[in-house]
Image (tube, helix red, strand yellow):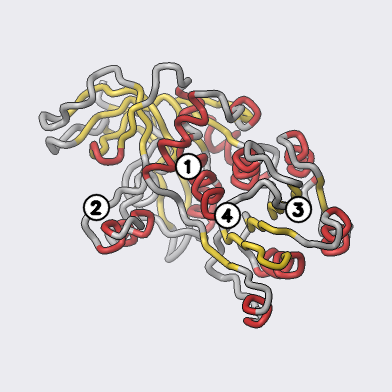
């Protein structure tokens, strides 16, 4: 059988488009440094919806899905350290290793990657049965990791990166704005660090309740509560030491700059290229605050994410809402995402 079911994105006009389940050719290794992965699990990301809606760029006629894991089915002749049957996960953001950013230790800002190399967005990805990938993108997994759980490695690595940039300390009051899938995954990582208080800001009732279940000490709904008043009450008029904006719109940035403590770190994680905000530079200078971006992650963040799952430090069962067959991706998976009644949905080819 030379065909497989795959979820293929088709552009309509200049932005956005539709995804169709189609029978496509099973890919073949064409380079000596490639591997053929049999995909066992692929997570649905909010980016997949943004691509369809025109909120994120993607190449036309590409198999979507960038959070995937599986087993090795075939290796190129120059791949010596992997063998057929190995459990593996992919870092979908292919880096060059030689541009100035890569060589300065900023591989997440690789100039080559910025041209569009991500598997599942610009190159064929994981909503399929098989994928051909360069060895450089592959991480071998411990035998004790379930492959459904392994589909969480990529988003978890982004959360690890965010946590590390935030430089979370034991005496910190930490606020996470937005309890969507990534906000909740970030919360799961931060919660493992001993901190003073963990506060979630979320308008959706289901997501807010999930934030409490995953370990938030307090939940604030900005639609019904005064966020600044509540934060000052919780922190004894100190404010938030670490604020992670997992939404990335003007309103959430404005909330962050109303509640930050002296010496606070504001981590901008959520992305929306249309968002614009106004800030007073003196509010940063006078109180020695920091505003930092957190974008995907480094190779070491992938290694750390693998260890968090392998050592059962992160309870993946609380993060995987449901698993569905690939043929239910559109009818069930995307609908659950749109209804905001999920953390991670895993598709099984």
Which residue is disc 2 drawn over? 97
Which residue is disc 1 drawn over? 157
Q: Quadrant of residue 105?
A: bottom left
206 left or right of 288?
A: right
Q: Given this view, does label 1 or label 4 mark the residue nearer the observer?
A: 4
Question: Which residue sits at x=50%, y=35%?
Answer: 43
Question: Which residue sits at x=61%, y=50%?
Answer: 168
Quadrant housing the N terminus: top left
x, y (%) of residue 155?
50, 42
Secondary structure beneath label 4 = helix
Which residue is disc 4 drawn over? 166
Q: Given this view, does label 4 or label 3 mark the residue nearer the observer?
A: 4
Mark 1 neighbour class, 10 Å CA radius: few under 14, some 14 to 19, many 20 or more: many
Q: Earlier in the sequence, mark 3 or mark 1?
A: 1
Q: CA distance from mark 1 to mark 2?
A: 19 Å
Q: CA distance from mark 4 to mark 2?
A: 26 Å
Q: Earlier in the sequence, mark 3 or mark 2?
A: 2
Q: CA distance from mark 3 to mark 1?
A: 22 Å
Secondary structure beneath label 1 = helix
Q: Are marks 1 and 2 in contact (CB under 8 Å)?
A: no
Q: Given this view, does label 3 or label 2 mark the residue nearer the observer?
A: 2
Q: Earlier in the sequence, mark 4 or mark 2?
A: 2
Q: Are marks 4 and 2 in contact (CB under 8 Å)?
A: no
Secondary structure beneath label 3 = strand
x, y (%) of residue 229?
88, 63
Secondary structure beneath label 2 = loop
Q: Please tell me which residue lies in front, 188 or 169.
A: 169
Q: Earlier in the sequence, mark 4 or mark 3?
A: 4
Q: Earlier in the sequence, mark 1 or mark 2?
A: 2
Q: CA distance from mark 4 to mark 3?
A: 18 Å
Whether residue 89 is situated above or below residue 208 in the rendered picture: above
Q: Using the rendered image of the protein, determine whether residue 32 is visible from the camera's viewpoint.
A: yes
């Amino acid at each position: 059988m030379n065909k497989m079911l795959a979820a293929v994105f088709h552009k309509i006009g200049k932005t956005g488009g539709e995804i169709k389940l189609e029978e496509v050719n099973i890919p073949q290794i064409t380079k000596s440094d490639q591997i053929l992965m049999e995909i066992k699990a692929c997570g649905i990301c909010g980016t997949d919806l943004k691509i369809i809606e025109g909120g994120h760029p993607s190449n036309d006629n590409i198999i979507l899905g960038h959070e995937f894991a599986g087993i090795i089915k075939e290796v190129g002749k120059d791949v010596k350290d992997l063998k057929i049957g190995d459990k593996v996960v992919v870092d979908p953001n292919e880096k060059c290793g030689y541009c100035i950013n890569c060589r300065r230790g900023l591989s997440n800002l690789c100039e080559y990657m910025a041209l569009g190399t991500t598997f599942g967005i610009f190159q064929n990805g994981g909503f399929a049965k098989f994928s051909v990938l360069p060895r450089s993108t592959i991480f071998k997994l411990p035998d004790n990791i379930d492959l459904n759980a392994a589909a969480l490695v990529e988003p978890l690595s982004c959360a690890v990166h965010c946590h590390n940039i935030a430089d979370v300390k034991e005496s910190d009051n930490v606020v996470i704005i937005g309890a969507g899938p990534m906000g909740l995954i970030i919360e799961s990582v931060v919660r493992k660090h001993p901190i003073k208080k963990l506060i979630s800001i979320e308008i959706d009732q289901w997501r807010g309740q999930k934030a409490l279940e995953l370990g938030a000490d307090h939940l604030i709904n900005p639609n019904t509560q005064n966020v600044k008043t509540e934060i000052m009450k919780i922190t004894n008029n100190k404010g938030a030491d670490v604020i992670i904006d997992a939404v990335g719109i003007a309103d959430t940035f404005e909330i962050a700059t109303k509640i930050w403590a002296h010496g606070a770190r504001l981590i901008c994680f959520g992305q929306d290229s249309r968002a614009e905000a106004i800030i007073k530079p003196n509010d940063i200078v006078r109180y020695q605050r920091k505003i930092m971006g957190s974008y995907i992650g480094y190779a070491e963040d992938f290694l750390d994410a693998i260890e968090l799952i392998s050592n059962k430090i992160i309870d993946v069962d609380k993060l995987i809402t449901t698993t569905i067959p690939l043929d239910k991706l559109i009818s069930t998976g995307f609908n659950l995402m749109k209804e905001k009644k999920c953390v991670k949905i895993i598709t099984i080819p």
